[in-house]
Image: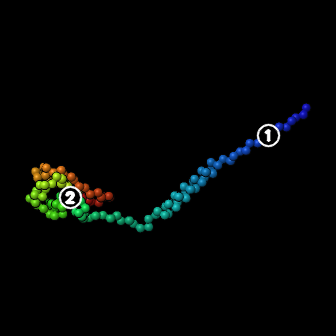
Amino acid sequence: MRMRHVPATHQKQQPDISLAIVNIVLLLIFFFLITGRMTNAPTFAVEISETAVLPVEHLPKPILELKTDGTMWLNGEEVDEVQLSNAVVDQQVLHLLIDRNESAQLLLDVLARPEFSHLMLRLVTVHRSGGGEGA
């Protein structure tokens, strides 16, 4: 009896490239982490600008500013109670600007005035980033 030799079928095995892809991706991540830190490193301190005195012409009109010393300013001009009453007679809206550290009682006293009863009062705030003091 003669044995026949059956040739083994050779399947082409494709190489597993997933390990190579993972290595390339990790190398790219490391490359961008390292070069990103080198190029984005600040070489000087940055000082953010801050407005100490806000120009009245950039604020909505009419605006009543209540200062910390008790004075009132309407549209950039100091006014007393009589001048303020005469100035707001024909107005429908009055914007109020008060320092954030001021007593809330001062604001409540102003809001309770009879000459403001016909007005829509809007509180104007000034946004300041950081921990500084603002209006």
Residue occupied by mark 1: 8
Q: Which of marks 2 and 1 is in front?
A: 2
| Along the line of sight, the residue nearer the viewer: 8 or 58 | 58
Name the foreground residue: 67 vs 118: 118
Residue 81 in sight from this viewpoint = no
Q: What element carries label 2?
A: loop
Closer to the camera in the image, 118 or 127: 118
Residue 17 in the image: x percent, y percent? 64, 49
Residue type (three-letter) at the residue carrying disc 1 = Ala
Q: Position of residue 127 (x, y in %)?
A: 29, 57
**Residue at x 13% of width, y 49% of height:** 117
The residue at 49%/61% (across/down) is 37
Between 120 and 108, the one nearer to me in the picture: 120
Comes first in the chain, label 2 or label 1: 1
Q: Which amino acid does label 2 sit on?
A: Lys
Dot 1 falls on a residue whose secondary structure is loop
Tell me if 125 is positioned left or right of 41 in this view: left
Q: In which quarter of the image is the N terminus?
A: top right
Q: Which residue is pictured at 18% across the width and 50% down the height?
A: 120
Instruction: Identify the residue under disc 2.
Output: 61
Q: Residue furthest front?
A: 90
Q: Residues within 10 Å of mark 2 (few under 14, many from 20)?
A: some
Image coords of residue 9 (percent x, y): 77, 40
